[in-house]
Amino acid sequence: GVKTDWHNLSHHGKDENKIDELEIIEKEEFSLFAKFLGDLQSHQESDSSLLTNTAVLFGSNLGNASSHDWRNLPIILAGGGYRHGSYVAHDSQDNTPLSNLFVPLAKRMGVSIDRFGKSTKSSIRGLES
């Protein structure tokens, strides 16, 4: 277990003890996320799994919570019939807003939108199905 709450641990300031405790929490979060995806995959809906018919977004609004850095967000998109199994880096020169991801997600769910928040495009590189 851990002795400190997640928020304080996330502002670790490179303190190894806090990072070790944060790692315990994050490993459990990813274990539960993997179990959730496995449960979705194991349930069938007509000709495909529930995971294929569900888009699951997992991530954070901070790339480095210790310094409140909003760049390089760790985002995972699972299911939804998208092409998976790859890593797509959107660096500072590409400067892709996270809101660009929400446009194709909404369209996949049948919501006809061209923008979401401060999105700059109606698609996002690397999301093709």
Image (spheres, rainbow, N blue to C red):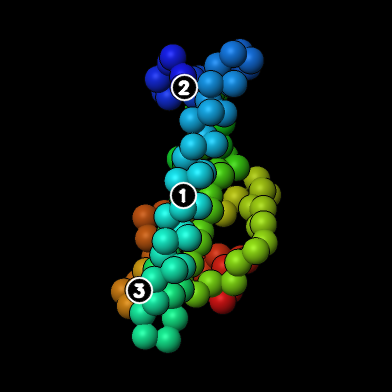
Q: Nearer the viewer, mark 2 or mark 3?
A: 2
Q: Which mark is residue 70?
A: none
Q: Report the side of 110 relative to 122 (left or right).
A: left
In this picture, is 26 found above or below 119?
A: above
Q: Earlier in the sequence, mark 1 or mark 2?
A: 2
On the image, which quarter does residue 23 sit in?
Answer: top right
Residue 116 in picture, x, y percent from top left: 37, 60
> Mark 2 — residue?
1
Gap between marks 1 and 2 measured at Cα: 19 Å
Q: Secondary structure at mark 3?
A: loop
> Mark 3 — residue?
109
Gap between marks 1 and 3 measured at Cα: 22 Å
Residue that lies at the very extreme toward the bottom in this rendered image = 47
Q: Amino acid at mark 1?
A: Phe
Q: Nearer the viewer, mark 1 or mark 3?
A: 1
Residue that lies at the very extreme toward the left in this rendered image = 111
Of residues 78 and 104, the one nearer the viewer is 78
In this picture, is 117 found above or below 65?
A: below
Q: How many marks?
A: 3
- Are the residues at dot 1 and dot 2 in contact (C-beta closer than 8 Å)? no
Q: Report the side of 118 relative to 77 (left or right).
A: left
Q: Amino acid at mark 3?
A: Met
Residue 44 in picture, x, y percent from top left: 39, 77
Residue 60 in picture, x, y percent from top left: 47, 41
Q: Quadrant of the C terminus?
A: bottom right
Q: Secondary structure at mark 2?
A: loop
The residue located at (37%, 85%) in the rendering is 46
The residue located at (66%, 57%) in the rendering is 88
